[in-house]
Amino acid sequence: MSDIDVSGRLTGKVAIVTGAGQTPGPTVGNGKAMALLFARAGASVVCVDRSLERADATVATIREEGGDGLALAADVSDPDEAAGIARTALETFGRINVLANNVGIGGAGDGPAKHLTEEAFDRILSVNFKAAWLVIRACLPIMEKTGGSIINISSLASLAGAQMLAYETSKAAMNRMTQSVALSGARHGVRCNAILPGLMDTPMAIVGISERRGISPDDLRAERAARVPMGHMGTGWDTAHAALFLASEEARFITGVLLPVDGGQAARVG
């Protein structure tokens, strides 16, 4: 739990967070942390997830803390459902000020070029890259009327990968899209930046990878922490605080940035 006071930083704003549900696990994921932090900062938050149950759980926590949230089930890789996210936000709250694209997958079938399956390549590119573009495309006409901030959750793997060609390519594409949208949106007052998390202690990373590799979560945590210059992994709250800064007026002159949140790992690249 983050105990930093962020009240007032997004007062009166409307934010969409995709992937705002919580993958089962003992720690907080990036999406849920962003949704909670945005709400604590004063935003009304549209919490989007494929699982309505998980989106509802995030909204329940927001409301318990006195915030305002709306749960919405959607598959962001479906063009009609992506468009429906923007439409629902507009109909419910009258505007969109912040969009955080947080949906991402890896998994079976990914690997080096000679082992990567076509099915995995298509699925990962569709969910990680194309889906973010679909939601951006739907939200931009609304955001251009008032200005706003788009935050794409990329990955340090976009710069220095580890034998996951589809995942790395999808995140590298997201980086380029971020800068393209930043340039085209600038004259409309729409900023677009990306966060590149490094090794994070989130349920999707720890639970999923430990199961695939057949090692204990604690052993995986120790292995990952040893690779970080700061000596420990980050958490979903670290991603969320970076996103809050980029969403806020404090970052009003910042656009097209690829921001590593990684304990220093990116400093080793090259």
Image (cartoon, rainbow, N blue to C red):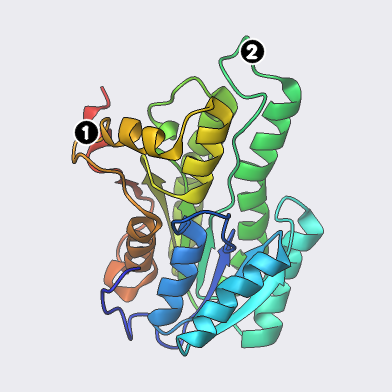
Which residue is found at the position 62% from the left and 86% from the top? 93
On screen, residue 113 versus residue 117, left or right, reads: left
Residue 267's mark? 1
Q: Secondary structure at mark 2?
A: loop
Which residue is found at the position 49% from the left and 70% from the top? 35
Dot 1 surroundings within 10 Å: few (below 14), some, or many (20 or more)?
A: few
Q: Is residue 75 above or below residue 156?
A: below
Mark 1 vs mark 2, CA separation in Å: 30 Å
- Amino acid identity at mark 1: Ala
On screen, residue 257 versus residue 180, left or right, reads: left
How many numbered circles are shown?
A: 2
- Amino acid identity at mark 2: His
Q: Is residue 161 visible?
A: yes
On screen, residue 4 versus residue 13, left or right, reads: left
Q: Is residue 144 above or below residue 76?
A: below
Q: Is residue 145 visible?
A: no
On screen, residue 93 versus residue 148, left or right, reads: right
Of badges 1 and 2, nearer the viewer stands: 2
Looking at the rendered image, the quarter that the N terminus falls into is bottom left
In percent of width and height, residue 11 lies at: 40, 87
> Contact (CB < 8 A) between labels 1 and 2?
no
Looking at the rendered image, the quarter that the C terminus falls into is top left
Q: Is residue 166 above or below residue 252?
A: above
Q: Quadrant of residue 192?
A: bottom left
Q: Secondary structure at mark 1?
A: helix
Residue at mark 2: 115
Judging depth in this view, the residue of 142 and 222 nearest the camera is 222
In percent of width and height, residue 87 lies at: 72, 74
- Check the image and name the residue furthest to the left: 230
In percent of width and height, residue 24 lies at: 57, 55
In percent of width and height, residue 166 lies at: 59, 28
